[in-house]
Image (cartoon, rainbow, N blue to C red):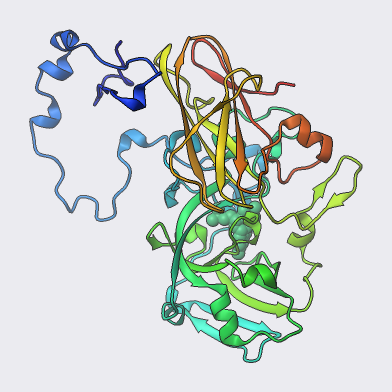
Amino acid sequence: MTVSFKNGKASRRQFLTGAAAAGAGTVAASVAKAAGDPLITEKQVWAQATGDGVDATPYGLPIEFESDVVRRNVEWLTADTISSINFTPIHALDGTITPQGCAFERHHSGAIEMRKEDYRLMINGLVDTPLVFTYEDLERFPRENHVYFCECAANTGMEWAGAQLNGAQFTHGMIHNMEYTGVPLRTLLNEAGIQTEGKWVYVEGADASSNGRSIPLEKALDDVLVAFKANGEALRKEHGYPVRLVVPGWEGNMWVKWLRRIEVTNQAVESREETSKYTDTLADGTSRKWTWVMDAKSVVTSPSPQAPIKHGKGPLVITGLAWSGRGAITRVDVSIDGGKNWQEARLGAPGSKGAMSRFYLDINWDGQEMFLQSRAHDDTGYVQPTKTQLRDVRGLNSIYHNNCIQTWWVRSNGEAENVEIS
Ligand SMILES: Nc1nc2c(c(=O)[nH]1)N[C@H]1C(S)=C(S)[C@@H](COP(=O)(O)O)O[C@H]1N2
Ligand SMILES: [Mo]
């Protein structure tokens, strides 16, 4: 059978052999077909002249053919773009690392621009010695590398009442997963010396919103990082250049950008807007607060509404992402019939706590409609709930922390839609 990719240009014939293709049919272009294919028989423009020199793009950008793989926002969601959010194009990415240029942004008062030279980080409050660090000071402490996801608590928040946004980018794209380089917050706090009454840290950013949040000291001393690099390079302005807080597994709001001050306190600073805002309204109208940890969740990224099947029936790679703030992803199940039957997917790599996992299920698609779902398991034994199970506990009035199983209705023409099945 023949597989030809979009518009023939720069097309590649892929020959899958061996174990990877076992059970998924054969994907092979016939050699005879090459005779009539100008991409094989004719000398192409790109072979008739030389290409760009090495200095064409000192900082490399994606090739123009990938220009639709970008962050997007939903205009009606917020009044302006300053206090707003955009979404990671997860439907078009693979692997687990989010390139910084594709990583969603969430600002409460816009992305600010600060030079490293002007950077200062203060630690004060219930400490023996209040301290101020420059950027260079931070670079002199022993540093670590860790891959972690950052998910806004509002991710999937528009889907509580019904299937709403048509695309994995919009339903699940308030998340990114990067490799951070930074100094453990514990190191800096120990440098200042925490007094015995200290139970919390209040962290704030240098932007107008300051995005102040309280974090229990236990977490602050555990795995929180004061990070200055992401995916090997400096943080982008929109992600908090030059320094942001990384709070593994916990809601994105606590990952303070342009980190400016850390105050050790004896209780949570509760009066601040953000602290009271990020609560979950339950079915009975009462509120649930301090829901910091992001529960296990997953989504099929392809096929999905923005990534339809274009090749017809036969071998099909179903893929997606899974993550848990509580532990490592141990298993992901995929259903093509709306949750009646489940098959265990293949993980791209063993799961790691607080980091995203990529999963694949290689099937031989019969061309019939599918109700595609994925279900994540983490190493605490937690299993991602269905929408009905989540609503039974949380009702319909919540916005934050929606980690239910997502359904894509894939029609026989390969197009997919966001639907809800009960
Ligand atoms: N200083 C500051 N930090 C902030 C914010 C902000 O507006 N100002 N937004 C928070 C929210 S709600 C989220 S979800 C994450 C988003 O991080 P990102 O913009 O790198 O994706 O940053 C958090 N940190
Ligand atoms: Mo957020």
Q: Residue furthest bottom?
A: 129
Nearest to the observer: residue 207 or residue 268: 268
- The residue depicted at 65 percent of the width and 54 percent of the height is 251
- Residue 361, percent from left and from top: 47, 27
Residue 395 seen in this snapshot: no
Decide which of 207, 142 is in the foreground and name it: 142
Looking at the picture, tell me which residue is in the foreground, 205 or 287.
287
Image quadrant in which you'd find residue 262: bottom right
| 343 lies above or below 352 | above
Compared with residue 6, is residue 232 higher up or lower down, i.e. above or below? below
Q: Quadrant of the N terminus?
A: top left
Could you tell me residue 229's position as x and y percent? 43, 64
Q: Tell me: 397 left or right of 168.
A: right
Residue 109 drawn at (x, y percent) = 62, 59
Q: Residue at x 17, y 19 (%)?
A: 39
Closer-to-camera residue (208/350): 350
Q: Quadrant of residue 258?
A: bottom right
| Relative vertical location of residue 389 with respect to residue 142 in this rendering, above or below | above
Q: Quadrant of the C terminus?
A: top right
- Against 121, residue 83 (above or below) is above
